[in-house]
Amino acid sequence: MTAKEILEQKGIDPNKPVLLIDRIEALAGLMEAISEFCPSVDVKKISKEDLEELVDSLGENIINYHPEDFHQERSSLLECSDMLEKYGLTDEELGNIDFD
């Protein structure tokens, strides 16, 4: 029996997304993490391309990290830290973001 067949047998819509977050929610979460961990970063100055990269990186990190203490957002900020330095990220703030 396939996964689709099992879901349909139980009356569960197999086409309904499991994870659904729009870019507004993604950026709002990232902005909250930025304000807490790296307030020197000026989100308004981030270029369109860089902002898309940052927001889209959160999609992957939602799967890999738990939501407590902004781990999903912080992992995206760490992933994009080289880019964020152009927008004010300091070395001290980079240390604040890291959760090793």
Image: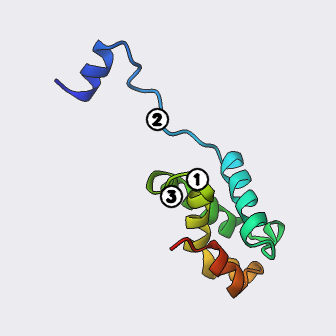
Residue 60 at what x, y percent from top left?
A: 48, 56
Residue 53 is left or right of residue 12, and the answer is right
Badge 1 or badge 2: first in the primary sequence: 2
Q: Amino acid at mark 3?
A: Asn
Badge 3 or badge 1: first in the primary sequence: 3
Mark toward the viewer: 3 or 1? 1
Q: Quadrant of residue 32?
A: bottom right
Mark toward the viewer: 1 or 2? 1
Tag 1 residue = 68
Rendering colour mode: rainbow
Tag 3 residue = 61
In the image, residue 20 above or below residue 96: above
Residue 83 at what x, y percent from top left?
A: 65, 78
Q: Are marks 2 and 3 in contact (CB under 8 Å)?
A: no
Residue 76 at what x, y percent from top left?
A: 58, 65
> Which disc number belongs to residue 37?
none
Residue 38 is left or right of residue 21, and the answer is right
- At 50% across and 58% down in the image, what residue appears? 61
Query: SS of the residue at dot 3?
Result: helix
Query: SS of the residue at dot 2?
Result: loop
Tag 2 residue = 18
- At 62% across and 69% down in the image, what residue appears? 77
- Near mark 3 (Cα within 10 A), the count class, few <14, some 14-19 or many ≥20, is some
CA distance for labels 2 and 3: 15 Å
- Near mark 1 (Cα within 10 A), the count class, few <14, some 14-19 or many ≥20, is few
